[in-house]
Image (cartoon, rainbow, N blue to C red):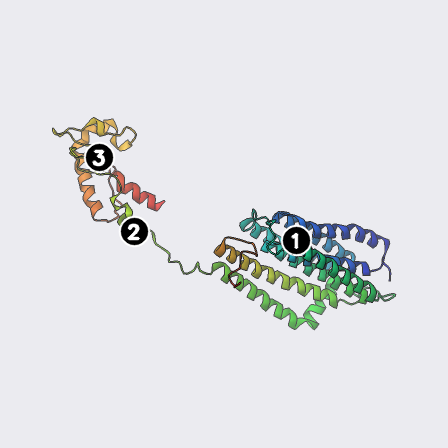
Amino acid sequence: MTTSTGEAVAFWILGPIGLAGGLGMVFSRNAVHSALWLVLTMLSLGGLYMVQSAPFLGFTQIIVYTGAIMMLFVFVLMMVGRDASDSVVEVLRGQRVAAAVLGIGFAALLLGAVANSVVVPLAVGPAPGSNVGSLGLLIYQRYLLAFELTSALIITGALGAMVYTFAGRAKAKVITQRERVTQRLQGPLEKFGSRSGPGVFATGDSVATPALLPDGSVAPESLSAIIEATARERLGHATELAHAGDEHDRHARDHEPHHESHQESGRPQSEIQGSQA
Amino acid sequence: MSPTNYLLLSALLFSIGTVGVLVRRNAIVVFMCIELMLNAVNLSLVTFARINGSLDGQVMAFFVMVVAAAEVVVGLSIIMSIFRARRTASVDDANLLKY
């Protein structure tokens, strides 16, 4: 049985491409390059399937292998090992040389065995019927049990992947927003912010609360120019402002996250907002 | 051209995959080499089906593809969990069971 000329041409084009892809995958340092070389090999193998009167397998090869499996590989590579190119250090001394010798010997053995033992019958026609239809009949009649087992295998694989991916993550307790706010207000942030310095009459330790001079007027040096709550035009309400800060201080000591905070309450409001963000 | 050439190509690809498994240290690349070996076997199965004029070999190749898909999913998730635990994808660094 000899093949047609067109098939020979396709083989001598696609075969070396596939071989080059395999060699490139083994010898390229970058893992992403390896994946792309492997995609080349798989594409050429799909072409070879189609040439060998197996169009269903050819398309399945291209769709499933290069489309799905290699995409999965590239996904994981981008997440895990993109910059982890192989180290040049040999952990076992002479391992690469030994592997190369073993590989060449193995290849010679396989090639010799195949070339010497495979007997190609003189003339065997292609299988009758259309390829896809005959394959479907075979899969759903003679190999039905194996096909069902395959579905069980795939479901098990999907479940296993989910278990591996979410292992250890499901135990983490979900913290609600309220618990998080309470934690922050009771944690190291409780004493956050600076108290007023000695000699300054202040009713609150917020930077938005202006300090009062001994006569009750607002000390202009204590006003921050960049905080909106202490804009100059609001200075007239300094007394009310101070009282508001007083009240707000009492609230803050209760550690209760309250949402109807005053506009002047600089510290806890910003904290609550920060925790909500 | 005899169809045996396909088998020889398949043998060569399988050997390349074997050498890759032995040489490479990145777990994902090792895994890709295993995929290459599976593909080589698929090629030989398809060629045998053609030589014998029956479709059983193609059905076997189809099943190999399905099993390979499931294997890839589980294997990659194992690699991901190892990476999450040990921050590495190298097969040399996963040596907790060594001594």
- Rendered location of residue B74, percent (x, y): 56, 61
With A163 as the anchor, is A128 left or right in this view? Answer: right
Q: CA distance from mark 1 to mark 3?
A: 66 Å
Residue with the most extreme left position: A215
- Asked if labels 1 and 2 touch by Cβ distance under 8 angstroms, the answer is no
Front residue of this view, candidates A126 and A182: A182
- Near mark 1 (Cα within 10 A), the count class, few <14, some 14-19 or many ≥20, is many
Q: Is residue A244 left or right of residue A40?
A: left
In the image, residue A187 sits, relative to residue B52, either above or below, namely above
Circle nearer the N terminus (2, 3)? 2
Secondary element under disc 2, as helix, strand or loop, is: helix
Q: CA distance from mark 2 to mark 3?
A: 25 Å
Q: Locate residue A69, reporting x and y percent.
A: 62, 56
Which label's residue is closer to the chain start, 2 or 1? 1
Q: Amino acid at mark 3?
A: Thr
Measuring 81% from the left and 61% from the top, which residue is drawn there? B4
How packed mark 3 is, by other alpha carbons closer than 10 Å (few <14, some 14-19, many 20 or more), is many
| Residue occupying the point 71% across, 66% down | B59
- Which dot marks residue A209? 3
Chain of residue at mark 1: A
Q: Write down the quadrant of residue B64 in the picture.
A: bottom right
Helix, strand or loop status at disc 3: loop
Kindly report which numbered mark, 2 or 1, lies closer to the viewer in this rendering: 2
* Residue A57 drawn at (x, y percent): 71, 60
Q: Position of residue A47 (x, y in %)?
A: 74, 54
Q: Which residue is mark 1?
A: A66
- From the image, tell me which residue sits under label 2: A183
Please tell me whether mark 2 or mark 3 is closer to you in this view: 2
Residue at point 25% right, 44% down? A191
**What amino acid is found at the position of numbered circle 2 in the picture?**
Gln
